[in-house]
Amino acid sequence: MNPHLAPVGVPDPAALPHVQRLCDLADPYTRGPAEDELFAAAMAEINAWHTERSPFFRSLYEATPPAHPYRTPLVHANFFKRHEVVSIPRDEVELRLTSSGTTGQKSQMFFDRWTIRSAQRMVARIFERNGWITPEQEVNYLLYSYEPAPALDLGTAFTDNYLCDFAPARGVAYALRDTGGGSHEFDPFGCVAALRRFERDDAPVRILGFPAFLFFTLERMRAMGLPPLRLPEGSLVVLGGGWKGHADRRIGKEELYARVTEQLGIPGERVRDTFGSVEHCVPYVECDHHRLHAPVWSRVGARSTRTLEPLPYGETGFLHLVSPYITSVPAQSVVMGDLASVHPGDACGCGLGTDWFTVHGRAGVSRNRSCAVAAAELMKGMS
């Protein structure tokens, strides 16, 4: 068994039995009345947990109408860029992650053992369901993320390095090279060289990280007049992080996937986008129809940009993410800065029954920055 699939226990089994049961569900996309009842019970438990331990959350919860879904107040993700709020003693914090790059406002999120292990187990279960846990098969990694450096605590770097645990590494190349002093620099020629080197090997290639970096690498290959590569069978692309800061050069998802197939020889069903954030670590991974389905451990919705009221299927508003998995910070109901529309599971056709969402971009223009914004600045003048 992959160690990330191993059992993990909630901090207080007597207080959180339904949270434990929900997060122990092994099928990422099971659904039905029983799962809905379990989810609601788990939300009641996690609300009580944070109400008892967080004065901030207690004040919000007491002001929330009982008819509100799960009676859980909304907290905007930007709140965590300005405030450090925890529901556990500081000595129980096992991990601190930030959401932005070298400068700018940062979300500071704190994780106890249960919270981070629970989120990792969710990722592992989704990878297992897709057949992407291959302990017997070495792979070569090209990581479109930050090369490890002292004191690097960015959520994207943590996630991408964690994803390397699902297949043993024969070789690893980083797109963002550590240049010392807390700085990183995008290395497009190094990425091209790594892909050409990996093509000559018999091990599959796994490409993980920011889609914009992958696109700029493909553009550089084309500008250099390089012929298409044919990466070994079984190669996989798992993207995440968006195009923030380079919206003017963004290409559509379908076009990017077609370019990957054309220039790297990886079929479209082996190219998947993801959505996640340091404020809400539940993984959303595209199905083979390229839709972001909510796993059983979360619920997704869209909120009016004017009133924050829930919107029906198909209408665009702020993305609202709900999950009772998190015991360390009262972030079980987070409104993101992303605009999204939510759709019923049967509108996809992939066979997964849970709701899915489409991200339509960021709301407005903000000086708040994310990992992708900071990373995008490293690409200026290099593509």
Image (tube, helix red, strand yellow):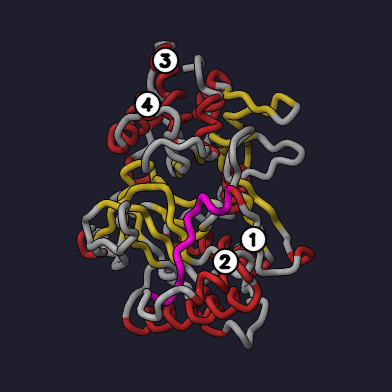
Crowd tier of the residue under label 2, counting other residues whose Cα lies within 10 Å: few below 14, some 14–19, many 20 or above? many
Q: Residue shown at 38%/68% (left/top)? A: 29
Q: Which label is found at residue 330?
A: 2
Question: Relative to the observer, which residue lies in front, 150 or 233?
Answer: 150
Asked if residue 139 shows in the view, the reply is yes
Crowding at mark 1 (Cα within 10 Å: few <14, some 14-19, many 20+)? some
In the picture, the disc for residue 16 is none
Looking at the rendered structure, which numbered label has been put on residue 85?
1
The reply to whether discs 2 and 1 touch (Cβ–Cβ < 8 Å) is: yes
**Tags 1 and 4 touching, CB below 8 Å:** no
Residue 105, magenta (yes or no): no
Q: CA distance from mark 3 to mark 2?
A: 50 Å
Question: Is 301 placed above or below 306 here?
Answer: below
Identify the residue under disc 4: 263
Q: Which residue appears at 22% of the width and 61% of the height?
A: 313
N-term mark: 1 or 3:
1
Out of 222 and 310, give the one closest to the viewer.
310
Q: Position of residue 169 (x, y in %)?
A: 62, 43
* Magenta residues (range): 69-81
Give the label, 1 or 3, closer to the camera: 1
Q: Residue at x 68, y 65 (%)?
A: 112
SS of the residue under disc 4: helix
Residue 22 percent coordinates (x, y): 49, 77
Q: Which residue is mark 3?
A: 226
Location of residue 304 in the rendering, given as x and y in whole percent from the top left corner: 30, 56
